[in-house]
Image: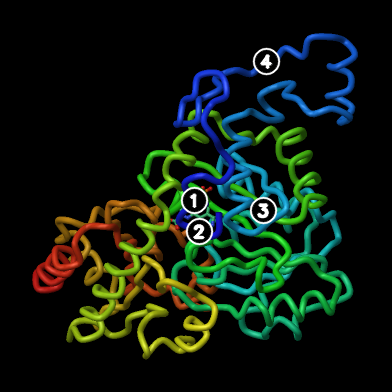
Amino acid sequence: MTHLRTRAVHAGQHPDPASGAIAMPITQSTAFAYGSLERGAAIFAGEAEGYRYGRYGNPTVAALEAKMADLEGAEAAVAFASGTAATAATVLALLQPGDELVFLGPLYGGTEGLLRSLGERWGLRVTDATATGLAAALSPATRMVWVEPLTNPSLQMHDLAAVAATARAHGALTVADNTFCTPCLTRPLAHGIDLVVHSMTKYLGGHGDATGGLVAGKAAHIAQIRKTGLGHIGASLAAQEAFLFLRGIKTLPLRMAAHCEGAQAVAGFLASHPAVRTVHYPGLPSHPQHALAQRQMEGGFGGMVTFELAQGERSAAASMLNALKLFAQAVSLGDVDSLACHPASTTHSFVSPEARAAAGVGEGMIRLSVGIEHPDDLVADLSQALAAR
Ligand SMILES: C/C=C(/N=C/c1c(COP(=O)(O)O)cnc(C)c1O)C(=O)O
């Protein structure tokens, strides 16, 4: 299998050997008989393959991990109960108190909030390199560099190959949160990044009905993250959720194409609207990193569009958002349903006003997760909402 569209359907799974079932069976079990003391001891010692207890692994979850490792071009992957759990497990497994994590922001507010809480309560040194640039922020204590290739919510881009080269020269691991791009548009490991994190809750599930996270990368790193995240923290993904992700990922390439088509149309409409001051979309020539987007992304520029109204107050944003009919006002993203939110009062309310200002998250900013509805209907909804202000 070569094409990602084919691997999205078939990688990691096969018809059930017992029943022939094409859809992956949901193994709704926490206990797994291992047949003899000797085999049980060998499984617990890691000397034999086999399931031992739901917290450590499950056949339905294993198929999802294998599929995502294939799509990201990774040696291995481990799934978690949420993207935040995947983030926490990665940091806690690979770093220790006194180490420094440098991030290139802006980041999703919840991720920055988690990292800063680990700094305050666990002794992790957390440095925001957004303003200074990565090289200037590195120190002898730097062990990890965290980046979102396409940032939440301002849709800035980071050059993954450059980040990977700078961090590797310093001896630091790199982690890319690929939630916004998915492996359809960007595969960070191919640019030299060490680990990829996903909130599967978003595009990978794609239907707003499952919460999950995943880390993919080298087998040795994934084994450490698995031990910490599942064995010690217990942030396991349920089999039912894994089934929903397996089903969602089968159509991911088709859905991403529709998301990209809709977002490009929406961004083009907003860019020419008098009530809109700025549109952030990597597919627009006006995007400061449009050339990088053309190099680093393939097949489209994503389904997220963020813009600022000319009238920058929260009241103007409220008037527009409250008038939407097709876009639902909700956080999260990557659903087949189009969603709209006001980051300053929701997803980025976790970070300080100063950090929000530094990240460009103003009161007039609106973030759109463009779904797979027909672009004309989405543009019509935005047009009537902008006129209603
Ligand atoms: C309400 C949640 C939003 N985001 C979440 C998110 C997470 C965290 O992922 P879980 O929500 O823990 O699966 C990790 N990484 C990225 C780039 C994210 O956007 C949101 O922005 O709307």
Residue 143 lies in quadrant? bottom right
N-terminal of the pair, mark 2 or mark 4, is 2
- Rendered position, 187 above or below 273: above
| Image quarter in which the C terminus is found | bottom left
Q: Residue at x 81, y 46 (%)?
A: 224
Label 4 crowd (10 A; few <14 / some 14-19 / many >=20): few
Q: Residue at x 50, y 19 (%)?
A: 19
N-terminal of the pair, mark 3 or mark 1, is 1
Label disc, if present, on residue 31 of the rendered structure? 4
Contact between marks 2 and 1 (CB within 8 A): the answer is yes
- Image location of residue 120, percent across then percent down: 72, 56
The CA span between labels 4 and 3 is 26 Å
As helix, strand or loop, the secondary structure at mark 1 comes to helix
Three-letter code, disc 4: Ala
User: Residue tagged by mark 1?
Assistant: 8
User: Residue tagged by mark 3?
Assistant: 216
| In-front residue for pair 322/340 | 340
N-terminal of the pair, mark 4 or mark 3, is 4
Three-letter code, disc 3: Ala
User: Residue tagged by mark 2?
Assistant: 4
Q: Residue at x 64, y 18 (%)?
A: 30
Instruction: Mark 3 vs mark 1: give the one in front.
Output: 1
Residue 34 lies in quadrant? top right
N-terminal of the pair, mark 3 or mark 2, is 2
Label 1 crowd (10 A; few <14 / some 14-19 / many >=20): many
- Image location of residue 20, percent across then percent down: 49, 24
The CA span between labels 4 and 1 is 30 Å
Query: Within 8 Å of ligand 1, the CB of disc 2?
Result: no
Q: Residue at x 75, y 65 (%)?
A: 101
The CA span between labels 3 and 2 is 17 Å
Three-letter code, disc 2: Leu
- Image location of residue 363, percent across then percent down: 35, 72
